[in-house]
Amino acid sequence: MSDAILEISHFTFQYNAQAAPTLRDINLTVRRGEKVLIAGPSGCGKSTLIHAINGLIPSSYHGKMEGSCKVAGKETREQSIFEISRHVGTVLQDLDGQFIGLTVGEDIAFALENDCVETGEMRRRVAETAARVGIDSHLRHAPNELSGGQKQRVSLAGVMVDNVELLLFDEPLANLDPATGKQAIELIEEIRQQSGAAVIIVEHRLEDVLWRDVDRIVLLRDGRILADAPPDELLSSPLLRDNGIREPLYLTALRYAGVEITPDMAPRSIRTVELSGERQRKLRQWVQDTPQPRRACGGQELLRAENVEFTYPSGRKALQGVSLSVKKGELLAIVGCNGAGKSTFAKVVCGFETPQEGRILFRGEDMASLSIKERADRIGYVMQNPNQMISQTRIFDEVALGLRTRQVPEEEIKTRVEETLRICGLWPFRKWPVSALSFGQKKRVTIASILVLEPEIIILDEPTAGQDYRHYTDIMEFLTELNRRGITVVMITHDMHLILEYADRAVAFSGGEIIADDTAAHILTNGSVIERASLKETSLYDLALRCGIADATGFVQHFIDYEREVARK
């Protein structure tokens, strides 16, 4: 018996609604126990490849198929989706869209109920699987009561309960805070070792996935496999950077210092990369030779929160005495663990929720008497889940909706919408139905629908989640350009790269309180804040320590300044 659980040979797929194939001549083999990372720019065919593996192609997505796609030795086109699900389990990016049961226990049991497993055996297997992923104490909870990390454990248990041989993870880190994301990667590795199942991870956050070793990285571009190689080999080549994948920050810093990255250095992780005396010397020399001025942040106060308290009807206190000042023209990041109060604070600012205590002032005026619409003329809000914002069928109409409700002339609408679509990387899809887009593309549509209104402040909840590095950079450079023109940008984010690269200031939430308000460099090198806010120390900090740089925080700030003042110009 072959040890290959997945065998794809010369596989091409073209959707019925499209003029050209999305996947072209794909050849890929994954063996039992292997862990493979699939990376590539948005729209390269990653999701389509996942759909081909788990049977949604051709079961739910119809089109022209050529070549072979075998799971457990049998062509997927010859199996029902039910048969394939006995071998392949998929954990979706949108975790809420995966839940079926009213409780965690019911959700995990769903597959067993379909198999008509006897009740006693079902309960035993549910309890055993829940314990395996560390969610056994929450079996009676409703899924919507759980944190992001807990939801992911439930989804994982729901597919593992059938003892599948191949686990697919579609951007598992997109909606998780850094510490929970790290735990998720550790959990995936632990489950792989215990079960012997093969694992395929589709993810843009390369450095976070490589926290635990992967066997291979498969790089997709325009529906083709450009590379299928060990991480050390790919990280030493320009292929990842040239195709929209952000390399680990410690490697970027070493390249800036003139260090050549080679496979023999084991560059796949900050824990494994070999740093000889000469490489350390080059890094220290780079810091000495390239002093950079720090970006000053001034301006008058635009928004102020004073002692804001908010408690949900359930009794959960989400905000406790929150006071925060936001200056005009600032680019501010709000960070913290899932459930820390970040999104609740944004909802209070925008008027979606009313605080029990405290007040919100805009240009010194108490906004308590303003309607949501009046607040929206001043403050734009982009929600984390794009499906909760979209109401129109066509992309152009969705982005134009806010302007049309404000009775802006149609010719001006056309100009503003088209400009925004270009900047957000959506111009080629302007006539598409929104339903045809990926989760990440829908995210860009919602950002565009707010950006086109040109508010004074824009609050974005996870603006770069699910974006490849090119689209991430396009969006953030656009936001930065708006910021330069005076628009204040507030980002709620779990992306440590984003904080380091773009934020003037970072505010950390924990337990509904603000526990730190400082530069990104100071927050991401402060062990106490990192632990309380479920953040993750930047690998730049570890690099500095390994190279004997005494002021590790100063080194991180130096990298930030160099990126802003030199590398991106």
Image (tube, rainbow, N blue to C red):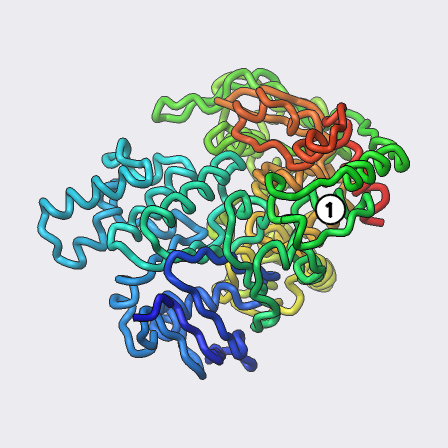
Secondary structure type for disc 1: helix
- Which residue is at 68% across, 43% downward? 249
Question: In the rendered view, does 407 fall on the left or right side of 548?
Answer: left
Q: Depth check: 54 or 267 in front?
A: 267
- Which residue is at 42% across, 38% downward? 149
Q: Depth check: 61 or 186 in front?
A: 186
The percent coordinates of residue 25 (x first, y second) are 53, 79
Q: Depth check: 385 or 38 in front?
A: 38
- Which residue is at 28% across, 33% downward? 138
The percent coordinates of residue 480 (x first, y second) are 75, 44
Question: In the rendered view, does 85 fall on the left or right side of 473?
Answer: left
Q: Which of the 4 image quarters holds residue 151? A: top left
- Which residue is at 36% across, 22% downward? 315
Position of the N terminus by quadrant? bottom left
Residue reaching furthest right?
A: 289
Question: In the rendered view, does 93 fall on the left or right side of 166?
Answer: right
The percent coordinates of residue 54 (x first, y second) are 37, 65
Q: Which of the 4 image quarters holds residue 32? A: bottom left
For the image, the number of numbered tags is 1
Do we see residue 12 in this rendering? yes
Question: In the rendered view, does 28 fall on the left or right side of 314?
Answer: right
Q: Which of the 4 image quarters holds residue 286? A: top right
Q: Residues within 10 Å of mark 1 (few under 14, many from 20)?
A: some
Residue kind at label 1, given as amino acid type: Thr
Q: Is residue 215 above or below residue 54?
A: above
Do we see residue 401 in this rendering? no
The percent coordinates of residue 347 (x first, y second) are 53, 33
Query: For mark 1, what is the residue?
Result: 252
